[in-house]
Amino acid sequence: VDRINMSLTIIPMAAEQGWSDSTQGYVLAAFFWGYICTQVVGGYLAQRFTGEKTLLVAVVGWSLATLMTPLATSSLALLYMCRVIMGVFEGLSL
């Protein structure tokens, strides 16, 4: 659900903030940059520290990033960071 939230809210948020189509694309792509970079790392960590511990850290991490997202909408840089962090932790869970 959390990776879909921005896809649903990007249109009204972009209208409110005055974002261009390319800015909207960067916001949506930020999640996937973190996501694709940590899938292999997540597998390694699951082998090294067990899947339960890795998943616990991942769920806590992406949940905190999801909670911080509304606060980060005041700055594109903060929003990008929240989206990348959310992707990093979701990638770890695979």
Image (tube, grey):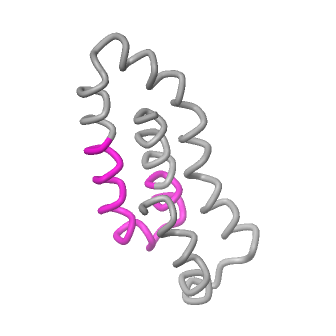
Q: Is residue 90 above or below residue 54?
A: below
Q: Quadrant of the N terminus?
A: bottom left
Image spot of residue 74 (x, y percent): 44, 73
Give left or right: position of 78 versus 70.
right
Residue stretch rendered in magenta on the structure: 59-82
Residue found 51% across the figure and 30% down from its top: 38
**Magenta-span inclusion, residue 34:** no
In depth, the one of 42 and 88 nearer the eye is 42
Give left or right: position of 25 versus 46.
right
Farthest residue, direction top: 48
Give left or right: position of 11 versus 45.
right
Image spot of residue 53 (x, y percent): 24, 26
- Residue 10, by quadrant, is bottom right
- Residue 49, by quadrant, is top left
- Residue 66, by quadrant, is bottom left
Count of numbered tags: 0
Residue found 30% across the figure and 53% down from its top: 63
Q: Is residue 59 above or below residue 2?
A: above
Residue found 63% across the figure and 84% down from its top: 18
Give left or right: position of 75 versus 28.
left
Image spot of residue 35 (x, y percent): 54, 41
Magenta region's main secondary structure?
A: helix
Residue found 73% across the figure and 77% down from its top: 20
**Magenta-span inclusion, residue 65:** yes
